[in-house]
Amino acid sequence: MTSGDQKLTVFPSNSSLSNRAHGMAKATLKRQISSLVESGLIVRRDSPNGKRYVRKGDDGGVESAFGFDLSPLISRAAEFSALRKAVHDERRVILLRKEEITLARRDIAKALDLARREVPKAPATQSQYRADILVAGITKAKSADAVTDLAAQMGSLSREIAMSLINHINSNIMSPNEAQNEPHIWSAPL
């Protein structure tokens, strides 16, 4: 279909468009139509008097139509579909990474709570401060890359706190008596 195809030209009045847009003000409607024309999504095909209408021939077919040519929308349909898919994919990545962030936040909170109870002298304030900074960044992270980076940092902090807690607990379990740490020799019954 070529630009200017009469079948793709629509000719609604401003009142009709305003009603379809749930009562949009006419000035806003004109501004929005102008931006669609400027961006090349529609082409304005005005009549000599500036009105939008269709003129039919003797056979009942469209002889000439004045209004908005929608053919650019049709010609760019594949582009719009690709953009829609890209937006959908980015939203999915953001959703998945935010789930990871939520799980990491929960793990960090539990580990810091356990550290406060089990190891009262442990310096958990540094880890809590880092976690608070990362949590504050959640609202600022809008793109998939930013949310992915934040999820990686939260996961890393969660693992770091857990390993620190495990190392501290293991060091307290170890006994100074080396005899208790020797391997146990097990012999199978005859």
Image (cartoon, helix red, strand yellow):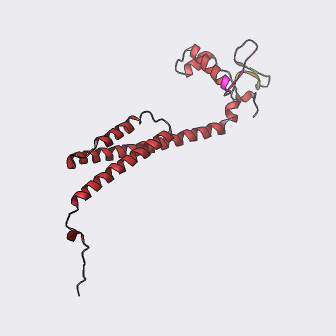
Q: Residue at x 28, y 52 (%)?
A: 165
Q: Residue at x 76, y 13 (%)?
A: 48
Q: Main secondary structure of the magenta part?
A: loop
Q: Which residues are magenta?
A: 37-52
Q: Residue at x 67, y 23 (%)?
A: 38
Tell me where residue 84 appears, x and y as whole percent: 57, 38
Q: Quadrant of the N terminus?
A: top right
Tell me where residue 88 appears, x and y as whole percent: 53, 40
Most extreme residue toward the right, as rendered? 58
Image quadrant assignment for residue 131: top left
Q: Is residue 148 above or below residue 56?
A: below
Can residue 156 be seen here? The reply is yes
Is residue 166 found left or right of 62 in the rendered image? left
Q: Is residue 42 above or below residue 104?
A: above
- The residue nearer to you, when weighing 79 against 61, is 79
Is residue 135 found left or right of 89 in the rendered image? left
- The residue nearer to you, when weighing 190 against 125, is 125
Image quadrant assignment for residue 41: top right
Q: Residue at x 24, y 79 (%)?
A: 186
- The residue nearer to you, when weighing 99 against 167, is 167
Most extreme residue toward the top, as rendered? 49
Q: Is residue 62 above or below residue 165?
A: above
Tell me where residue 122 appears, x and y as whole percent: 25, 46
Residue 45 on the magenta segment: yes
Residue 187 on the magenta segment: no
Tell me where residue 8 appears, x and y as whole percent: 70, 29
Can residue 16 be seen here? The reply is no
The number of discs equals 0
Q: Quadrant of the C terminus?
A: bottom left
Is residue 114 found left or right of 157 in the rendered image? left
